[in-house]
Amino acid sequence: MKKGLLSFLVFLAMLISARAQESVPAYRTSGYKGNVSFTSIGFLWNGIETSHGLMLNDIFYLGGGGGMLVGAVGKAAFAGSVFIDTKAYWIPRENTPTTGIRVGYLRNFSGETNNFEANFTVGWSWGLASGNGLSLNVGLSAVLPSGISYVAIDLPHVSLTPVVSLAFEF
């Protein structure tokens, strides 16, 4: 019994030691970081976006960015987006679950309504051998068209749309 307990404690100590020596990938160390992503909003607006900012520590990212989207709603429409981006990497390993919040403005250049937008996503980030990362995120986008009265927001104006994003992180 004593040998079994001692063996378990030695195994546990080795496991904790190995966990402590695990390093965070380069794309998640403190300092300047960025990403380029293919994003689909509601499977109708698709485009390329980029975000640049700071990893505050090995968990939290804060940045800002923009992108161009093409819509397939009846006729081709073009839109540009600007946003503030936050992301949390929950485990200090190369492969980790993530959550993100992004708040911004979507400008439709085709004369349609412009939108304020907030994205809430969950996903997974994989570290690559090059020290960069790849992440897949899914979530919801809460879209509020501009030009309506914000004193008494009528809830039918707010729409929830699925969002999918595949990003290369550096």
Image (cartoon, helix red, strand yellow):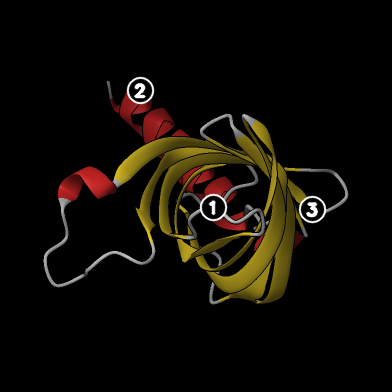
Q: What percent of the width, then of the height, locates residue 162? A: 45, 34
- Residue at the disc numbered 2: 4
- Residue at the disc numbered 3: 132
Q: What percent of the width, then of the height, locates residue 139? A: 43, 38
Of circles 1 and 2, the one toward us is 1
Question: How far apart are the two marked residues, 1 and 2, measured between alpha carbons?
Answer: 71 Å
Q: Badge 2: how crowded within 10 Å, few (<14), some, or many (20+)?
A: few
Could you tell me the amino acid type at mark 1? Answer: Glu
Q: Badge 1: how crowded within 10 Å, few (<14), some, or many (20+)?
A: few
Closer to the camera, 78 or 103? 78
- Residue at the disc numbered 1: 112
Residue 130 visible to an observer of this rendering? yes
* Disc on the earlier residue, 1 or 3: 1
**Residue 102 vs residue 9: left or right?**
right
Could you tell me the amino acid type at mark 2? Answer: Gly
Which quadrant of the rendered structure holds the C terminus? bottom right
Up/down of 4 relative to 143, above or below: above
Question: How far apart are the two marked residues, 2 and 3, measured between alpha carbons?
Answer: 42 Å
Up/down of 31 relative to 2, above or below: below
